[in-house]
């Protein structure tokens, strides 16, 4: 008996390491822990995945899950990417059932928030999912519900809190980066750029364009990634060759460069097939060209500010600096560039004001920063474009294409190099510190050789009579050209005095362009608008406005205002292209807006989507912010209403008729802007002999914003309930009584975005305060709409006036 017991004890002793391994690879009991000071980890039963600490930067550790059987430790989930811990930290499944990460000082850094019963054990599954279980083996928490930048086979992203993937800051920095993949409230799966550190979403740069409540993104066991919608329809994301998860490790990651990629890794060389053994290969990715995909005016684009993006031979984005600029952070080329020199100063005695040339222009072909324009000149040649930027202390870069010149100042965003652009970037750099163009990739000395050849030819010609004959011939040709040019100038309408960026039309030209002013587009306080076509410009459509009721003898004022308007360029403003000033005929030529006015769009038969309406509200706010605070001279519009907000091909809001208020008779802007005596678009100060400031536009915007929210006009006289006739009054009543659902007429899309809906209503109420000093500036309005500034509870709009009456 004793011998048998002894043999059993010996057997148990020999099996102890195996039993310990089974416990490690299976259920993790309460009281278990891991420390940064050892190399142990919790491993899945097959050994494919491990959970524990990994050293990422000197003495800093990340708590993560990674692929455990491949040499490259590929991390698929992390707990503390934004808050790395020092050596001496530990993760523990406490006896009370909490999974807690403590730093080296014992402070809680991260905790798995359990919401479904008490925890009795944990385990890392062969799917790569870390789970906490209760006594009934039910899952109370799992890492699959709290994704970082990666999803794995069998993982599902549901609309809601678990739907977001956030990129890393860099390939080796696990802090949250500038890109997110998420569901919109309508079920559309999109990729966003985000603002750091506020995490505010900018416009999306890729989407599935799908709609469906409770949509899911599924990564199934077969290696397919697809969207499943509530109506049962399937939207397949995976493209290219699909391989088995039996033979390949797989993952889909929103990489730090903003591209969502699906990867495969052969488990052994015999199963690699068309894929490279021993490395991750990309099956598919979206977007195909992120350099071109991001077009938002906000944010820096695919690369950082002042840099430009270009795909390399593997179709991955790379970020480059212009000549005489260097990366802000050499370890992170996606963080932007800074000039290596002192910028030209606009101060009287600053850099660039000394005698002699201080700066010159160097060029980069097929490169543009499309979101940084502040001036546009046309028609001009390249030399004029260069001289314009050199003579403008604010100009850092000019883009020349065709006969167009766009000037830009720092910081510049959305830089990109692409072969079919057909233009060039002219970079202002210190004189004598740069070559005339970017060196070729091969680093050849062709430029020096060509200059040497040119010098040799020049001296050879100087030593011959042929050169003298050529010089004489050139002089004759130049004289003939200047004589002819001088005659032509006598017969051209005035345009030079009003700037290079505006074209001067004759009345006869505009009469022909509009086919005798036949097709009327609309009428307003400033005149009648007609449709026309520029045959000389590829048949582009234009809108021609015949101005009426102008200030008498206002020729000088007209030229001054048109000059100012012509210099203004913003994506949310309708661009002025030209003018006519012949005798009593005053006409303006604008770009044509194909989708008409906001009035027709909002108050038509079908209700625009909530997403479209919020985009329009942002656009109008940004356009007014530019007019009030960002262009050279403050412009008060004085007539903000849906009829003066136009929509372009992509339904982007474009403000029209800005800058024209000064051209009307003194009382025109008061009597033609809204309904006199009612709380409409006209701010109360118009009728109280108070000073007129930019706050009148803020008031009008508040009314417009409520119309955008509610898809109804400010005054509806035919309603049964008289309390609802004036929208601004009714909107405040609904807000005070917490009945915002009535404002959007039970619009499910708007109601599902309840926080933004309430924020928009609060902003609108602040804007329509009858006391001007209580209204925010348009810059603050824009920040409040975007969520960058908290919106406090607004008072009754008429409370201040009532208190002093």
Image: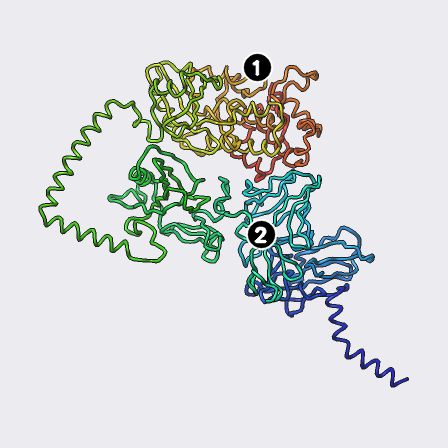
* Residue wearing tag 2: 240
State which quarter of the image contains the C terminus.
top right
C-alpha gap between disc 1 and disc 2: 65 Å
Picture coordinates of residue 606, whole percent (x, y):
62, 26
Residue reaching furthest to the left = 465
* Residue 99 picture quarter: bottom right
Residue 634 versus residue 804 in the image, above or below = below
Identify the residue at image location x=30%, y=49%. 436
Relative to the observer, which residue lies in front, 286 or 336? Answer: 286
Residue at the far right: name it.
Answer: 1
Circle 1 residue: 677
Query: Where's the N terminus, which quadrant?
Result: bottom right
Task: State the SS at label 2.
Answer: loop
Q: Is residue 564 left or right of residue 153?
A: left
Looking at the rendered structure, the secondary structure element under dot 1 is loop
In the shown orientation, is residue 81 left or right of residue 654? right
Residue furthest to the bottom: 3
Q: Give the camera-side residue of 697 and 754.
A: 754
Label 2 Cα neighbours within 10 Å, binned few <14 / some 14-19 / many ≥20: few
Q: Earlier in the sequence, mark 1 or mark 2?
A: 2
Query: Can residue 656 be seen at all in this image of the molecule?
Result: yes
Q: Position of residue 456 (x, y in %)?
A: 17, 53
Q: Position of residue 245 (x, y in %)?
A: 66, 59
Density class for disc 1 (Cα within 10 Å; few <14, some 14-19, many ≥20) is few
* Numbered circle sitting on residue 85: none
Foreground residue among 263 and 186: 263
Residue situated in front as seen by the camera: 477 or 183: 477
């Amino acid at each position: 008996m004793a011998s048998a017991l002894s043999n059993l004890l010996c057997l148990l002793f020999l099996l102890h390491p195996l039993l310990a391994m089974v416990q490690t690879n299976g259920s993790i009991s309460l009281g278990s822990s891991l420390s940064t000071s050892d190399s142990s980890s919790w491993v899945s039963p097959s050994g494919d995945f491990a959970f524990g600490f990994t050293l990422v930067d000197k003495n800093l550790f990340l708590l993560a899950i990674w692929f455990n059987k491949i040499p490259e430790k590929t991390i698929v989930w992390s707990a503390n990417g934004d808050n790395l811990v020092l050596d001496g930290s530990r993760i523990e499944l406490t006896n009370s059932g909490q999974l807690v990460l403590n730093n080296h000082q014992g402070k809680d850094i991260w905790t798995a928030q359990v919401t479904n019963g008490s925890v009795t054990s944990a385990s890392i599954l062969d799917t790569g999912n870390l789970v906490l279980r209760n006594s009934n083996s039910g899952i109370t928490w799992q890492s699959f519900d709290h994704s970082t930048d990666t999803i794995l086979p069998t993982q599902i992203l549901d609309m809601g809190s678990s739907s977001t993937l956030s990129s890393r800051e860099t390939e080796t920095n696990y802090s949250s980066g500038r890109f997110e993949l998420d569901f919109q409230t309508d079920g559309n799966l999109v990729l966003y750029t985000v603002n750091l550190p506020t995490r505010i979403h900018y416009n999306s740069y890729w989407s599935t364009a799908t709609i469906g409540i409770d949509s899911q993104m599924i990564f199934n066991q077969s290696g397919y990634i697809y969207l499943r919608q509530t109506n049962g329809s399937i939207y397949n994301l995976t493209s290219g060759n699909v391989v088995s998860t039996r033979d390949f490790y797989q993952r889909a990651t929103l990489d730090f460069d903003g591209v969502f990629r699906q990867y495969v890794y052969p488990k052994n060389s015999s199963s690699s097939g068309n894929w490279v053994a021993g490395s991750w290969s990309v099956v598919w990715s979206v977007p195909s060209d992120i350099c071109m995909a991001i077009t938002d005016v906000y944010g820096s684009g695919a690369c950082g500010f002042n840099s430009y993006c270009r795909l390399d031979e593997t179709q991955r984005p790379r970020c480059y600096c212009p000549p005489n600029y260097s990366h802000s952070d050499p370890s992170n080329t996606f963080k932007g560039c800074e000039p290596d020199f002192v910028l030209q100063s606009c101060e009287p005695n600053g850099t660039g004001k000394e005698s002699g040339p201080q700066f010159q222009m160097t060029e980069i072909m097929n490169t543009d920063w499309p979101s940084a324009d502040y001036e546009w000149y046309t028609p001009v040649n390249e030399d004029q474009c260069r001289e314009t930027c050199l003579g403008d202390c604010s100009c850092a870069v000019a883009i020349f294409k065709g006969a167009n010149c766009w000037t830009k100042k720092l910081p510049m965003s959305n830089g990109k190099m692409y072969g079919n652009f057909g233009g060039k970037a002219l970079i202002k750099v210190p004189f004598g510190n740069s070559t005339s163009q970017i060196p070729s990739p091969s680093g050849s000395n062709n430029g020096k050789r060509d200059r040497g050849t040119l010098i040799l030819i020049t001296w050879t010609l100087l030593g011959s009579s042929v050169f003298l004959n050529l010089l004489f011939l050139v002089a004759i040709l130049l004289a003939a050209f200047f004589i002819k040019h001088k005659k032509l100038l006598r017969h051209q309408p005035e345009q030079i005095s009003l700037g290079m960026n505006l074209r001067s039309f004759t009345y006869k030209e505009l009469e022909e362009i509009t086919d005798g002013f036949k097709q009327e587009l609309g009428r307003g306080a400033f005149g009648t608008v007609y449709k026309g076509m520029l045959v000389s410009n590829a048949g582009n459509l234009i809108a021609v406005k015949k101005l009426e009721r102008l200030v008498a003898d206002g020729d000088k004022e007209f030229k001054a205002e048109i000059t100012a308007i012509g210099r203004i360029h913003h994506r949310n403003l309708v661009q002025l292209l030209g003018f006519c000033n012949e005798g009593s005929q005053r006409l303006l030529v604008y770009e044509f807006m194909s989708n008409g006015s906001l009035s027709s769009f909002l108050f038509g038969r079908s209700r625009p989507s909530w997403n479209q309406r919020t985009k329009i509200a942002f656009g109008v706010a940004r356009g007014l912010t530019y007019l009030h605070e960002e262009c050279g001279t403050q412009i008060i519009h004085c007539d903000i209403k849906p009829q003066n907000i136009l929509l372009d091909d992509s339904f982007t809001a474009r403000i029209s008729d800005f800058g024209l208020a000064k051209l009307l008779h003194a009382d025109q802007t008061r009597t033609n802007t809204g309904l006199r005596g009612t709380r409409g678009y006209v701010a109360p100060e118009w009728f109280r002999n108070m000073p007129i400031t930019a706050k009148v536009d803020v008031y009008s915007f508040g009314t417009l914003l409520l119309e955008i929210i509610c898809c109804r006009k400010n005054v509806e006289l035919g309603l049964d309930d008289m309390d609802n006739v004036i929208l601004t009054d009714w909107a405040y009543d609904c807000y005070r009584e917490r009945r915002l659902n009535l404002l959007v007429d039970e619009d499910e899309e708007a109601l599902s975005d309840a926080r933004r809906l309430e924020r928009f209503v609060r902003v609108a109420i602040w804007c329509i305060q009858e006391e001007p000093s209580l209204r925010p500036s348009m810059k603050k309005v824009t920040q409040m709409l975007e969520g960058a500034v908290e919106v406090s509870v607004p008072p009754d709009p008429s409370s201040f006036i009532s208190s002093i009456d």
